[in-house]
Amino acid sequence: MAATNDHPGEQAAQDPLKLIAVRDTPLSLDEVFRAVGDDAAGGTALFVGTVRNHDGGADVDSLGYSCHPSAEAEMRRVAEKVVAEYPVRALAAVHRVGELRVGDLAVVVAVSCPHRGEAFEACRKLIDDLKHEVPIWKHQWFSDGTEEWVGAC
């Protein structure tokens, strides 16, 4: 049977933004994955950003994220752009603020779409645009005692 885009499941959902949040508490992969569950989705892509132990050739001990009060609204705006471009069935994005240690989850985003290719592309666009457009800043502390602020995300 040939694929057709006439089936409602091949289209974007009416209200695909399931979870958009900036939090000062630990993030949950399970919560984000559950939020994007959809019976019409054949593909779900999930991206997890974690605090790594190095940056720019220096050892990182810890970091802190802070944000502008508009950050959550900007996340929603970015998510709405992704939904307008792809047949998203469900989308979730959460970002952590506050003090984080190496290995902590900093950001979790997920997108479900009718097909895997769309899900991968939409998830990539979502995280890339969040990183470049949402006013969240990273303050890194290095093992040598130096520190550095890094722009959005």
Image (spheres, helix red, strand yellow):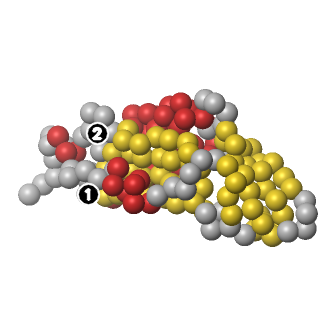
Q: Which residue is mark 2?
A: 12
Question: Where is 104 relative to 138, above or below?
Answer: below
Where is residue 89? Give x, y as percent. 30, 44
| The N terminus lies in quadrant | bottom left
Picture residue at 28% right of the left edge, 39% below the top = 12
Where is residue 106? Give x, y as percent. 60, 55
| Label drawn at residue 42 | 1
Question: Where is 72 relative to 2, above or below?
Answer: above
> Quick check: can you spot residue 118?
no
Image quadrant assignment for residue 117: bottom left
Q: Dot 1: what SS?
A: loop
Q: Earlier in the sequence, mark 2 or mark 1?
A: 2
Left of 18 or right of it: where is 13?
left
Q: Amino acid at mark 2?
A: Ala
Q: Amino acid at mark 1?
A: Gly
| Label drawn at residue 139 | none
> Looking at the image, which is closer to me, 83 or 105?
105
> Looking at the image, which is closer to me, 81 or 92?
92
Picture residue at 17% right of the left edge, 40% below the top = 8
